């Protein structure tokens, strides 16, 4: 059979049952579309994770103080472990003396009430060290210190606990709508601070406002709001990616010595060291697992849809019933004497395979034998 004749026969077959053909095509389209959409969702999730961790340094370590239950804490008193010691500002600065640590970024924060006149705003206050020259570069990777107005505080401001601040865009809009904010004064928990800069506006997030924050020198934050023995969060820049494991061991040994932790005696660490690279790998593995699960679900759905289509387009006769070909039925006309001899059998039953009259070559003899 040529290709054209095959194609013509297929088209004629589809035309004989238009509704069934339409449902079959619709099932195939929906199944394929579901697979494509699910695979796209998995790929999008993986790319989203990669985008989130793209700006995190692969040669950085995060150091936090933790409680005996393993929860991070901002101070020893809030950790729930009376024997846990905080990572103080002085201890964090001492990490810069380690051989594998290039620089440390220290922060200490919380929520405080900011006021100017009668206006008040609950704002996130972050105490941090002065930014370096590289961090002030107007680049995408250093977006934490991109300023729209003014200038950041310096090392001298951190050293002398200066009451200066750099405010976010939301704070500037709330208190200085028609005024120049640089050079004005804000009160944080009743303490006056001089505004020396305004951060560039960041894109709004879904669940919080990323522009509602203020940065002040970390020494001032410790002295005025959080206490000098408050535990700080530390991000350490390591000299190279290959030194991550060695630097982790070096920082752990340094903190154990400062906190007098005897590992040989079975004492647990009251700090936690995490690598951005490890977090990125864990998130990527989770995204890949999620994508694999979605792909498997889509494949199973497509197989089930195919089986359903096959069941609806297959033989619709009851199970165990053997139908006679259409041409054979037309070739063997009804036998009137069979109906006269056996009136208990309906006329259409004469063509069932179980009836001897359905065998035309021995029709008369079989009927006589059965009725005899």
Image: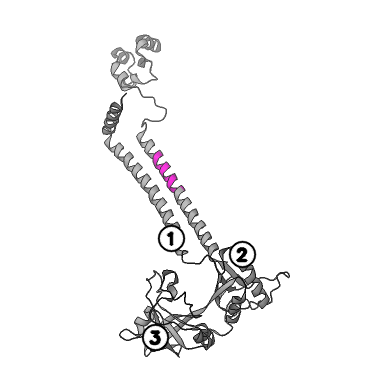
Question: Which residue lies under the disc numbered 1?
Answer: 48
Q: Residues within 10 Å of mark 1 (few under 14, many from 20)?
A: some
Q: Residues within 10 Å of mark 3 (few under 14, many from 20)?
A: some
The stretch drawn in magenta includes residue 298? yes
Q: Position of residue 199 (x, y in %)?
A: 40, 78
Q: Considering the numbered disc 2 on the image, is that residue within a helix, a strand or a loop? A: helix
Q: Which stretch is magenta?
A: 296-306
The stretch drawn in magenta includes residue 242? no
Of badges 3 and 1, nearer the viewer stands: 1
Furthest residue to the front?
Answer: 133
Looking at marks 3 and 1 on the same chain, the residue that comes earlier in the sequence is marked by 1
Q: Which mark is residue 120?
A: 3
Whole-angstrom CA distance, mark 1 to mark 2, is: 27 Å
Q: Which mark is residue 160?
A: none
Question: Which residue lies under the disc numbered 2?
Answer: 245
Q: Position of residue 203 (x, y in %)?
A: 37, 71
Q: Is residue 335 left or right of residue 288?
A: left
Mostly what secondary structure, the magenta segment? helix
Q: Considering the numbered disc 1 on the image, is that residue within a helix, a strand or a loop? A: helix
């Amino acid at each position: 059979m040529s290709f054209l004749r095959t194609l013509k026969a297929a088209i004629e077959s589809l035309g004989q049952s238009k509704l069934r053909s339409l449902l079959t095509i619709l099932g195939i389209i929906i199944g394929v579309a579901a697979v494509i959409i699910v695979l796209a969702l998995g790929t999008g999730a993986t790319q989203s994770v990669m985008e989130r961790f793209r700006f995190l340094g692969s040669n950085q370590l995060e150091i936090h103080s933790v409680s005996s239950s393993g929860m991070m804490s901002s101070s020893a008193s809030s950790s729930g472990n009376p024997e846990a010691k905080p990572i103080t500002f002085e201890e964090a600065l001492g990490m810069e003396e380690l051989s594998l640590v290039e620089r440390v970024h220290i922060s200490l924060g919380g929520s405080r009430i900011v006021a100017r006149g009668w206006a008040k705003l609950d704002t996130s206050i972050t105490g941090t060290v002065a930014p370096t020259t590289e961090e002030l570069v107007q680049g995408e990777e250093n977006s934490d210190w991109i300023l729209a107005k003014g200038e950041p505080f310096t090392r001298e401001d951190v050293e002398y606990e200066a009451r200066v601040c750099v405010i976010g865009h939301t704070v500037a809009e709330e208190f200085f709508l028609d005024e120049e904010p640089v050079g004005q004064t804000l009160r944080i928990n009743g303490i006056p601070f001089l505004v020396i800069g305004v951060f560039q506006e960041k894109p709004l997030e879904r669940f919080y406002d990323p522009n509602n924050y203020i940065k002040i020198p970390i020494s001032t934050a410790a002295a005025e709001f959080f206490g000098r023995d408050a535990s700080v969060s530390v991000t350490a820049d390591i000299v190279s990616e290959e030194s991550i494991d060695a630097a982790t061991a070096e920082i752990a040994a340094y903190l154990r010595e400062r906190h007098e932790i005897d590992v040989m005696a079975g004492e647990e660490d009251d700090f936690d060291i995490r690598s951005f690279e490890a977090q990125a790998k864990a998130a990527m593995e989770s995204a890949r697992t999620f994508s694999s699960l979605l792909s498997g679900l889509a494949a199973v759905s497509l197989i089930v849809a195919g089986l359903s289509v096959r069941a609806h387009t297959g033989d619709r006769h009851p199970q165990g019933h053997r139908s006679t070909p259409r041409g054979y039925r037309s070739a063997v006309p009804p036998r009137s004497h069979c109906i006269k001899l056996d009136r208990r059998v309906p006329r259409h039953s004469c063509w069932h395979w179980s009836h001897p009259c359905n065998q035309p070559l021995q029709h008369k003899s079989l009927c006589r034998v059965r009725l005899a």
